[in-house]
Image: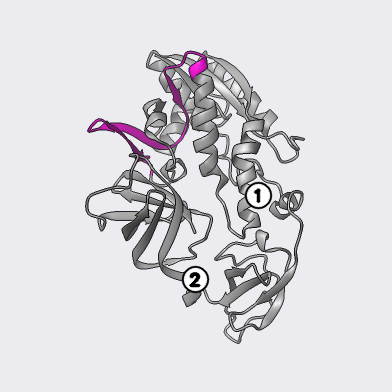
């Protein structure tokens, strides 16, 4: 079949394209440019990534097309990113980027090109089970990316393949090296997609005004000054500027909350302070891969409240089509509003919502 592969310039998507080509499919590479506000090359690697994508495509023996989704990204992802920070939350734009750009704008474009499927280098799997499409964790537990894909729906999954989802990262690099792909040793990208390696505070200050205010304990004792609530997240330890204010035991400070009304950053001492441990959460803007909240035993579920976290046993209470609550068997550390709570039943990702 004709499959359009999203080539990012990285090794995972290149190997995805290579495997599909070897399987006999008609493969076309598509490079997405999603950010152009300050694409000067200092921090944004778009030019370098495009060169790497084209070089890999030449080695594989496929054509590659570049498409600009910057307008769609700004409207569908970045606007929401800024709105969340204004509201004092900590968003995860990669989740929205997957749902709105990589598996919507990109999918629509690929279908216009006559594609039957799209493919990416994500570490996840898709299977048809009982007439429905299921999103499964990637086989490599250290690289599983189903957390970032939990907002995909049945129509999107029906058109998607993840060729490296059944492989370990070490196997992906081996395949790339043996095939002579020029990016076989390229390091993985990190951080928020459009910020890259640039200083986060400097970037955010371009779009949101700085609003300094007090840093205080839950009892109201002022211990410092913050640069703006948007720059901090629950559980943060570094960069608070109050490292010298420790007790006799040298216990460090952690961000435990934000009081928007008084523009106060609330901090506590100790990693396991009660304010940093939560047994329950409420989430909204829920999205369910099966089209509806999961049925069956609500106690057979696990959830992640952040990426690279082990599934935590929990009970689900559905409050409405887009709202739910989770009760955890053990307290969860630094549950952060704006991040995603993603539910699993074993290896199957069920969907999730935004922590409210």
Whether 298 is among the magenta residues is no
Residue 276's tag is 2
Instruction: Tell me where residue 215 appears, x and y as whole percent.
Output: 68, 74
Instruction: Residue 44: name its quadrant.
Output: top right
Mark 2 vs mark 1, CA separation in Å: 25 Å
Q: Residue furthest front?
A: 320
Q: Residues within 10 Å of mark 1 (few under 14, many from 20)?
A: some
Give how far across and how far down residue 221 sits, in percent.
66, 83
* Residue 274 as seen in the image, left or right of residue 133: right
Instruction: Measuring from the top left, give residue 113's x and y in whole percent.
Output: 52, 14
Q: Residue at x 55, y 18 (%)?
A: 57
Helix or strand or loop: what does disc 1 sit on?
helix
Mark 2 residue crowding within 10 angstroms, few (<14) / some (14–19) / many (20+): many
Residue 244 to residue 37: above or below: below
Residue 82: mark in rendering: 1
Q: Specify the segment rendered in magenta.
A: 111-140
SS type, badge 2: helix
The x, y position of residue 217, in whole percent, is 61, 79
**Residue 131 on the magenta span:** yes
Q: Would residue 310 be seen by someone viewing this image from the given angle?
A: no
Q: Residue at x 62, y 58 (%)?
A: 87
């Amino acid at each position: 079949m004709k499959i359009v592969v999203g080539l990012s310039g990285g090794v995972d998507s290149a190997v995805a394209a290579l495997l599909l080509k070897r399987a006999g499919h008609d493969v076309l590479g598509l490079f997405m440019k999603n950010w152009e506000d300050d694409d000067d090359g200092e921090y944004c690697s778009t030019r370098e990534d495009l060169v790497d994508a084209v070089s890999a495509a030449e080695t594989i023996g496929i054509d590659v097309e570049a498409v600009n989704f910057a307008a769609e990204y700004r409207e569908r992802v970045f606007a929401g990113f800024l709105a969340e920070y204004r509201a004092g939350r900590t968003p995860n734009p990669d989740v929205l980027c997957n749902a709105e750009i990589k598996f919507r704008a990109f999918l629509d474009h690929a279908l216009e090109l006559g594609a039957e499927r799209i493919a990416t280098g994500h570490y996840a799997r898709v299977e048809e089970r009982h007439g429905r499409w299921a999103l499964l964790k990637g086989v490599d537990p250290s690289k599983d990316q189903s957390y970032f894909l939990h907002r995909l729906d049945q129509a999107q999954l029906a058109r998607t393949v993840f060729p490296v989802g059944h492989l370990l990262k070490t196997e992906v690099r081996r395949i790339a090296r043996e095939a002579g792909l020029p990016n076989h040793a390229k390091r993985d990208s990190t951080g928020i997609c459009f910020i890259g390696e640039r200083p986060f505070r400097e970037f955010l200050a371009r779009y949101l005004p700085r609003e300094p205010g007090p840093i205080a304990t839950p009892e109201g004792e002022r211990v410092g000054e913050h640069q703006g609530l948007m720059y901090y997240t629950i559980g943060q330890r570094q960069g608070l500027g109050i490292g010298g204010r420790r007790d006799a035991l040298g216990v460090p400070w952690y961000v435990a909350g934000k009081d928007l009304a008084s523009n106060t950053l609330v901090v506590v001492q100790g990693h396991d302070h009660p304010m940093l441990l939560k047994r329950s959460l409420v989430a909204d803007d829920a999205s369910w891969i099966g089209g509806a909240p999961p049925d069956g035993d609500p106690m057979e579920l696990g959830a992640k409240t952040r990426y690279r976290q082990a599934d935590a046993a929990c009970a689900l209470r559905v409050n409405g089509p887009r709202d739910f609550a989770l009760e955890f068997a053990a307290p969860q550390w630094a549950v952060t509003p704006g991040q995603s709570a993603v539910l699993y039943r074993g290896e199957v990702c069920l969907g999730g919502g935004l922590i409210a």
